[in-house]
Amino acid sequence: MANNLAEKPKMATPPATEFATGTGRARYKRVLLKLSGEALMGDGDYGLDSDTVNRVAEEIKSVVEMGVQVCVVIGGGNIFRGVSGAAAGMDRSTADYMGMLATVINALAMQNALEKAGVQVRVLSAIPMSAICEPYIRRRAARHMEKGRVVVFAAGTGNPFFTTDSAAALRASEMQCNALLKATKVDGVYSADPTKVKDAKRYYKLSYLDVLSQDLQVMDTSAISLARQSKIPILVFSIFTHGAFADVMQGKGKFTIISD
């Protein structure tokens, strides 16, 4: 099946009847947005770009205003990557914990940007840090979302050897989200890196097994497997396209959906 997909990619634009509601309202009631730390760097090589963080906050706000309950998981690669630290000779567990602390920095920056935009938000950390945010408690997180607050999950799963992709799939499952949206630099999943391969094909729809068998590296294998087990579709889109988050929520724009 993987070879057939590579040769005959499915249409890049979803049929209007599959996602569009015809009312302009969101397709999903509760979603998790997975952001990479690198998405917050802007044009820089390191750290946070305030304009980019504020723009992403506005993207989230536009979806909240549609009546959608939103939670967010942010990576920490713009500050520190545990895998890179381990590759440089650091103890893997120590490096991963440092990476988790980086995600807390990003979560606090997003909290500040969302509050400036007039959005109620709470940061919940898998590693207790009572002076700066709330500890992660599943029922508390769900209650915040029911009240219309954006919940930003920090510190990954709280355990080393697990990526923030795995944390996103885990939190989406625990929060019983209707979809997991993976925000990337490109507008979907391609047969090859579109920045390096000019004629790379963009898929409209893939199965979880397609992603695993073709090693498309959308998310790590444990995240894909957990999403499949929880029957949570993964929608991949570009966070750098203005209004893309809201568009995808209505079945518009360019994206790839991964499901059974």
Image: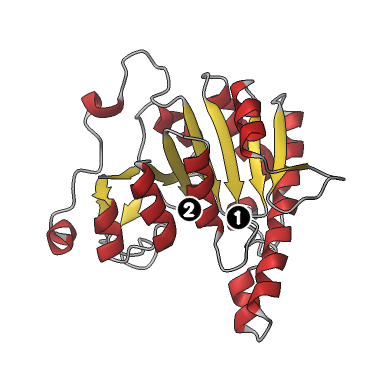
- Residue 94, located in which quarter of the rendered image? bottom right
Q: Is 18 placed above or below 112 here?
A: above
Amino acid type at circle 1 is Thr
Q: Secondary structure at mark 2?
A: loop
Task: Write the residue at 68% across / 60% down.
Answer: 100
State the image coordinates of residue 97 (x, y, percent, origin top left): 70, 66
Left or right placement of residue 238 versus residue 258 in this view = right
- Residue 149, located in which quarter of the rendered image? top right
> Is 83 in front, or is 46?
83
Task: Write the residue at 51% across / 19% down.
Answer: 66
State the image coordinates of residue 90 (x, y, percent, origin top left): 69, 82
Task: Write the residue at 31% across / 66% down.
Answer: 215
Q: Residues within 10 Å of mark 2 (few under 14, many from 20)?
A: some
Amino acid type at circle 2 is Lys
Tag 2 residue? 185
Q: Secondary structure at mark 1?
A: loop
Mark on residue 245? none
Kindly report which numbered mark, 2 or 1, lies closer to the viewer in this rendering. Answer: 1
Task: Write the residue at 40% across / 52% down.
Answer: 226
State the image coordinates of residue 184 (x, y, percent, origin top left): 48, 51
State the image coordinates of residue 1 (x, y, percent, origin top left): 14, 59
Cα gap from disc 2 to disc 1, whole angstroms: 24 Å
Mark on residue 157? 1
Q: How is the image coloured?
A: secondary structure
